[in-house]
Image (cartoon, rainbow, N blue to C red):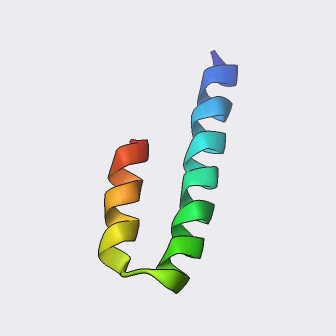
Amino acid sequence: MPLRRIYVLLVLFSCLRICAVFQLILEPSVCYYLFHCCL
């Protein structure tokens, strides 16, 4: 279903946005860890 693909993209996009915010405050390794947590 296309809806499921859209949902996955939305979750991934929000994860990347949170990741970008955390990268400003914390280390990029934390961003890497959060990205794998979302996946």
Instruction: Pinpoint residue 35: horizontal percent, then vertical percent.
Output: 40, 56
Near-viewer residue (27 or 7) = 27
Near-viewer residue (28 or 3) = 28
The quadrant where residue 7 appears: top right
When the figure is inspected, residue 12 is found, relative to residue 16, above or below; the finding is above
When the figure is inspected, residue 12 is found, relative to residue 3, above or below; the finding is below
Instruction: Pinpoint residue 9: horizontal percent, then vertical percent.
Output: 61, 42
When the figure is inspected, residue 15 is found, relative to residue 39, above or below; the finding is below
Instruction: Pinpoint residue 1: horizontal percent, then vertical percent.
Output: 63, 15
> Residue at (40%, 68%) from the top-left corner?
31
Count of labels in the image: 0
> Residue at (55%, 61%) from the top-left corner?
16
Residue 38 falls left or right of residue 6? left
Residue 32 falls left or right of residue 24? left
Quarter of the image with the C terminus is: top left
When the figure is inspected, residue 24 is found, relative to residue 18, above or below; the finding is below
> Residue at (62%, 63%) from the top-left corner?
17
Which residue extends farthest top? 1
Residue 4 falls left or right of residue 38? right
Near-viewer residue (8 or 21) = 21
> Residue at (30%, 73%) from the top-left corner?
29
